[in-house]
Amino acid sequence: MKRSKTIFIAVLTVAGLCAAQAESLYKWVDSQGRVSYHDRPPPEGSDFRVEQKNLDAGRKSEVDDTLEKIVEKYPVVLYSVPVCGSCDLARAYLEKRKIPYSEKNLENNVELQQKLKQKYGALSAPTITIGEKVMKGYVESILEGELDTAGYPKMEASGSGKEEVTGQENTSATGDAGQQPARRRY
C-alpha cells in the first residue's frame, strides 16, 4: 500500500510539472465522471468533456503590453560604427538585458551623420538615445540607470550580476595572509 501511494504521488508530481510548463491545461472528464488533466486536448471523436484553462497567459500579456508601451514612449536607438569596442559593449549590454532597440550605422551614411550633428550637437559613436535622453559614449552604469528610469525591465537575476572573486587571500610581499603592506611616507 505504501509503495503504491509513493508511486501515485510521484506520478502526480510529474504530471504537475508537465502541466506547469504547458501554456494550456486541459481537464478531461469521461462518461463515468473520472477526471484527468493533460497538456493537450483529447483525440478527435473521444467521449471526453473538456475544460481548457490558459496558464500564465494573463501575466505574459500584461508584461508584453507594459514593455510595448515603454518601447513606444522611450524607444532605444544605438548609433554605431562597425569597428568600435564601446559600440560592441553597448550592443552586448542591451542584448543581455533583452532591451528592444534599433541600431543605425553611421559609417558611410553622411545624411545620418549630419542629422546626428544637428540634433545632438556632435558626432560620436556610440550615441544611444532612450526617448529624448541622449548618451554620448557608453558607460554601463549610466545606461542602466537611464533604462531603469524609463521603466525597462531590469536584468534577470542570475546571482548578483557582478563577478565575484573567491578563494584569494590578501597576501603581502612577505606572504602573511590578512596583513596590509605598510605605507611608506616620503
Image: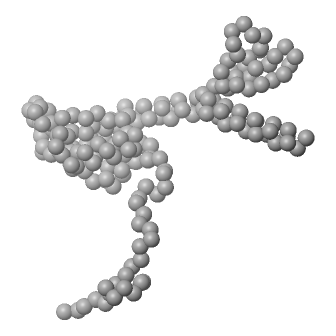
The image shows residue 118 at horizontal and vertical percentages of: 12, 38
- Is 38 placed left or right of 165 in the picture? right
- Is 177 placed left or right of 44 in the picture? left
| Vertical relation: 54 (above or below) 134 | above
Task: Point out the image quarter for the N terminus.
Answer: top right
| Vertical relation: 120 (above or below) 51 | below
Can residue 69 be seen in the rendering of this structure?
A: yes
- Depth check, front residue: 30 or 98: 30
- Is 103 placed left or right of 38 in the picture? left
The image shows residue 183 at horizontal and vertical percentages of: 28, 89
Give the colouring mode of the picture: one colour
Image mark count: 0
> Quadrant of the rendered structure where residue 18 is?
top right
Outermost right residue: 1
Residue at figure coordinates x 15%, y 45% from the top left: 124
Can residue 121 be seen in the rendering of this structure?
A: no
| Vertical relation: 8 (above or below) 180 | above
Task: Point out the image quarter for the C terminus.
Answer: bottom left
The image shows residue 24 at horizontal and vertical percentages of: 63, 25
The image shows residue 130 at horizontal and vertical percentages of: 31, 41
Residue at figure coordinates x 34%, y 88% from the top left: 174
- Depth check, front residue: 183 or 4: 4
Residue at figure coordinates x 42%, y 32% from the top left: 69
- Depth check, front residue: 94 or 28: 28
> Quadrant of the rendered structure where residue 33 is?
top right
> Quadrant of the rendered structure where residue 141 is?
bottom left
Residue at figure coordinates x 82%, y 42% from the top left: 6
